[in-house]
Amino acid sequence: KAGVTQTPRYLIKTRGQQVTLSCSPISGHRSVSWYQQTPGQGLQFLFEYFSETQRNKGNFPGRFSGRQFSNSRSEMNVSTLELGDSALYLCASSPDMSGANVLTFGAGSRLTVL
Amino acid sequence: GENVEQHPSTLSVQEGDSAVIKCTYSDSASNYFPWYKQELGKGPQLIIDIRSNVGEKKDQRIAVTLNKTAKHFSLHITETQPEDSAVYFCAASSPSGGSYIPTFGRGTSLIVHP
């Protein structure tokens, strides 16, 4: 069974640019969530999507957005990049059965903003 | 919102010793407590989890205990091996918008010396 796939694995951008990251969840998983990991702030929740709808949102500015497609694949976008956006962006999928679900994480997309 | 404190931030042990990592949480509505192991260059991987109706769970060398009254939960690793060296994260998941959103601790870097 294939795991969670994130692309690209590494990317370098400059301030003011925008970036789009992609996540393919485990087959059959309907919930996809995104996290930002930095040495200073740790693992922080960005947003969660289920059935193409944003179900939960963390405390991040509107420059951070996402979407989910009908095949459960998800993308997140960061516009007007700032130096502080440099981080490992992690995607996780879960089957979304009743109760708290087990998350399976991808390997992440490491974004460097210069 | 939920707040999770994790201690220690670094733990150094000799191979064969036991390691204990402790977490506290603040939201009494949290009812799912997973532990993740993150190796260099990889995403977090679930190693064990516990739900609020259980006080202890064991899986080979790994065990987790939960004290809901005190809002404490701990990870115990016995007979540590060099391959246990990694960063470990605890999390507390509380219900939100029809789902459960985890709040992560800041992580513990475990170093097992051969």
Image (tube, rainbow, N blue to C red):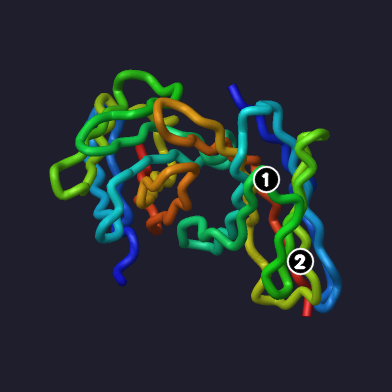
- The image position of residue B92, as x and y in percent, is 61, 39
Judging from the image, what secondary structure is the residue with disc 2 in?
A: strand
Apparent side of residue B57 relative to residue A18 in the rendered image (left or right): right
What residue appears at the point 37 percent right and 32 percent down from the top-left corner? A47
Closer to the camera, A33 or B14?
A33
Apparent side of residue B73 relative to residue A93 in the rendered image (left or right): right
Determine if residue A59 is in view: yes
The residue sitting at the top extreme is A62
Q: Is residue A59 above or below residue A103?
A: above
Q: Quadrant of the N terminus of chain B?
A: top right
Callout 2: chain: B
**Residue B58 lies in quadrant:** bottom right
- The image position of residue A49, as x and y in percent, is 30, 36
Q: Which mark is residue B23?
A: none
- The image position of residue B71, as x and y in percent, is 76, 35
Q: Amino acid at mark 2?
A: Ile
What residue appears at the point 30 percent right and 69 percent down from the top-left corner? A2
Determine if residue A91 is in view: no
- The image position of residue B73, as x and y in percent, is 75, 46
How many C-alpha atoms fall within 10 Å of the one at disc 2: few (<14), some, or many (≥20)? many
What residue appears at the point 56 percent right and 38 percent down from the top-left corner? B93
Apparent side of residue A21 relative to residue B64 in the rendered image (left or right): left
Q: Amino acid at mark 1?
A: Asn
Q: Nearer the viewer, mark 2 or mark 1?
A: 1
Closer to the camera, A34 or B82?
A34
Q: Dots 2 and 1: beta carbons under 8 Å?
A: no
Per the image, the residue denoted by label 2 is: B77
Q: CA distance from mark 2 to mark 1?
A: 22 Å
Apparent side of residue B8 relative to residue B89 in the rendered image (left or right): right
Per the image, the residue denoted by label 1 is: B53
Judging from the image, what secondary structure is the residue with disc 1 in?
A: loop
Q: Quadrant of the C terminus of chain B?
A: bottom right
